[in-house]
Image: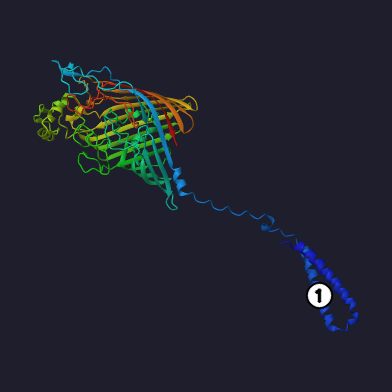
């Protein structure tokens, strides 16, 4: 309190009052006999004297520090709490996407090929015994000119939508805990063609591009310390573990042409999304992390010949009937799937080991149209509409029933399998290193295996003990980089299957793919690329160009469209050994 400053004016006032009263006292001597008045003056004088002493005492005390509240300026009022972000604005912040469209020009590389009949000479060697007659109708008499590829098999310009999608993702804190509810919904786009069924001359599907949920779609829980659990439809750990090693993702020359592709065609068995899946993705501990996935088959049949419950397509990526048999999931339908990936990161090094298994995969259509004489040896009779007798591995009963109902069926078709059902597994190891200079190198080794009865090994194209991938990317400038890649598919123990020009005498059923691409970044979101790739098939194999997420794939099928199937090669006209090559340029925008 400011006592000293306030006492001074008070003292002056009381001193003046004392002087006046003293004058009054002297001037009233004549009234001394008025005792009452004299007593009042005495009391007043005593009060003035006491007040004077109190003021003198206050002067002798040290000055008191001013109170903080009086010295400092009044503290500013607390800012009002920021209003909560509108829910719709928070929702919009979770929207993301990739838009990628390219112009392609690619050739199937089969001009000049001729389909031959083969037979064994006296020494058991396979020799050409004549040309296969026919034309594009596949129904011409044998005397017709030699069979050559049908349709436009040279360079064909086209527009392709490549791994484009739009999605929404977000999280919601559960109460005051450290656990969040997470969600993501994606749709895959067909920019160059619009929303439509994913069908082609060689692959049929009920999936509609542009549909909500066609993409990595899930709900789950996430904790900062323990990772996250999610449920939905998304890519497996096996696929995602090596994504970073594929600088050509979605482009011509994508490593999915070979890696994870057990059929050597336009479908990637171990590189697709798995429906109705449950996955756990761990946090990192000293550079280590791991991912687990289980996809229950949800199938009531013992051989997975129908769609899983809740699915429009067969597990494995085709609609029923897309194989060569009756309407069923005989071209890759499977039951449960398990996938796991272990990862390690340290500095510029990244390494991973991944494993995946598909249970009871139905490949009853694999041998049909394989053109392999071993298939023809499994049954006798048949041509001309008569009944046949066949090996227990084939479905003679169904075939003979169809021949009885449709007499011409036996002349254009052949029996399917009953026991071509087995587990398929994939194992790979990958490493990547980013050097101090702007160079990144990646390498992958992979092994695929299918377990089936020994009698069917002749058509086991799904087992491949050796596949390799090598890629290198060099940053030319801050905005430009150049990448090269090489993929090798080793030989399989059985016939790759389905070739019109099947050569039973070849043993070099392998393939190599070479690719190169230049990318120019305009900014962090937009880049332009120019891409070249070639797949060189040997022997009877028929790896394509462009598998793994592109709208367009260029494969080894010609333009024949007559649905005739049997082992003598009058079926879908696949040409083994084709040399597919293509050029592509496009824009990729991320937001």
Residue extending farthest right: 30
Asked whether residue 56 is in view, the answer is no
x and y percentages locating residue 209 in the rendered image: 33, 37
Q: 325 or 124, which is in the foreground?
A: 325
Residue bearing the label numbered 1: 46
Q: Where is residue 457 in the image (x, y as percent from the top left)?
A: 20, 29
Q: Nearest the camera: 96 or 60?
A: 96
Instruction: Tell me the quarter of the picture where residue 298 sits.
Output: top left
Q: x, y percentage for residue 431?
A: 39, 30
Quarter of the view holding residue 378: top left
The answer to whether residue 265 is left or right of residue 177 is: left
Image height of 275 relative to 415, above or below: below
Question: Few, some or many C-alpha atoms within 10 Å of disc 1 (few <14, some 14-19, many ≥20)?
Answer: few
Whether residue 114 is situated above or below residue 15 in the rendered picture: above
Locate the C terminus by quadrant. Answer: top left
**Can residue 93 be seen?**
yes
């Amino acid at each position: 309190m400011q006592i000293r400053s306030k006492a001074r004016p008070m003292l002056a006032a009381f001193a003046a009052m004392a002087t006046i009263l003293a004058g009054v006292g002297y001037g009233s001597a004549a009234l001394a006999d008025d005792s009452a008045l004299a007593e009042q003056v005495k009391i007043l004088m005593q009060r003035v004297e006491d007040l004077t002493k109190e003021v003198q005492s206050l002067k002798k005390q040290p000055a008191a520090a001013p109170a903080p509240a009086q010295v400092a300026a009044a503290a500013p009022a607390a800012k009002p709490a920021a209003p909560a972000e509108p829910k719709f604005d928070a929702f919009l912040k979770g929207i993301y996407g990739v838009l990628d469209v390219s112009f392609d020009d690619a050739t199937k590389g089969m001009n000049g090929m001729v389909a031959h009949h083969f037979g064994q000479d006296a020494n058991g060697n396979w020799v050409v015994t004549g040309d296969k007659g026919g034309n594009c109708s596949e129904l011409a008499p044998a005397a017709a000119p030699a069979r050559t590829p049908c349709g436009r098999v040279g360079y064909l310009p086209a527009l392709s939508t490549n791994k484009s999608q739009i999605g929404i993702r977000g999280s919601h804190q559960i109460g005051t805990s450290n656990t969040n509810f997470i969600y993501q919904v994606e749709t895959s786009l067909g920019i160059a063609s619009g929303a439509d069924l994913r069908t082609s001359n060689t692959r049929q599907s009920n999936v509609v591009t542009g549909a909500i949920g066609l993409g990595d779609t899930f709900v789950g829980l996430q904790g900062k310390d323990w990772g996250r659990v999610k449920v939905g439809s998304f890519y497996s750990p096996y696929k995602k573990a090596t994504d970073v090693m594929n600088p050509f993702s979605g482009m011509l020359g994508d490593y999915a042409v070979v890696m994870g592709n057990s059929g050597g065609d336009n479908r990637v068995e171990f590189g697709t999304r798995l429906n109705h899946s449950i996955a756990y993705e761990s946090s990192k501990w000293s550079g280590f992390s791991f991912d687990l996935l289980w996809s229950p088959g949800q199938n009531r049949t013992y051989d997975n010949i129908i769609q899983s419950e809740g699915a429009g397509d067969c597990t494995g990526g085709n609609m029923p009937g897309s194989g060569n048999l009756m309407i069923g999931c005989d071209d890759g339908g499977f039951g449960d799937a398990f996938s796991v990936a272990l990862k390690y990161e340290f500095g510029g090094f990244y390494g991973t080991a991944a494993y995946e298994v598909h249970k009871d995969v139905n490949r009853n259509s694999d041998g049909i149209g394989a053109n392999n004489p071993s298939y023809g040896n499994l049954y006798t009779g048949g041509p001309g509409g008569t009944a046949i007798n066949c090996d227990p591995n084939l479905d003679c009963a169904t075939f003979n029933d169809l021949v009885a109902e449709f007499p011409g069926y036996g002349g254009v078709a052949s029996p399917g399998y009953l026991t071509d059902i087995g587990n398929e597994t994939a194992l790979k190891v990958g490493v990547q290193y980013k050097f101090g200079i702007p160079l990144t190198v990646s390498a992958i080794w992979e092994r695929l295996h299918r377990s089936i009865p020994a009698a069917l090994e002749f058509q086991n194209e799904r087992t491949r003990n050796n596949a390799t991938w090598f890629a290198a990317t060099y940053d030319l400038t801050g905005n430009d980089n150049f990448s090269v890649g090489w993929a090798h598919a080793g030989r399989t123990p059985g016939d790759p299957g389905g070739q019109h020009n099947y050569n039973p005498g070849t043993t070099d059923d392998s393939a190599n793919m070479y690719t190169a691409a230049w990318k120019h970044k305009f900014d962090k979101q937009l880049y332009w690329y120019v891409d070249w790739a070639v797949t060189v098939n040997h022997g009877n194999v028929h790896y394509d160009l462009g598998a793994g997420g592109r709208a367009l794939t260029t494969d080894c099928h010609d333009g024949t469209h007559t649905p005739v199937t049997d082992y003598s090669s009058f079926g879908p006209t696949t040409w083994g050994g084709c040399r597919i090559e293509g050029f592509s340029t496009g824009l990729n925008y991320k937001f």
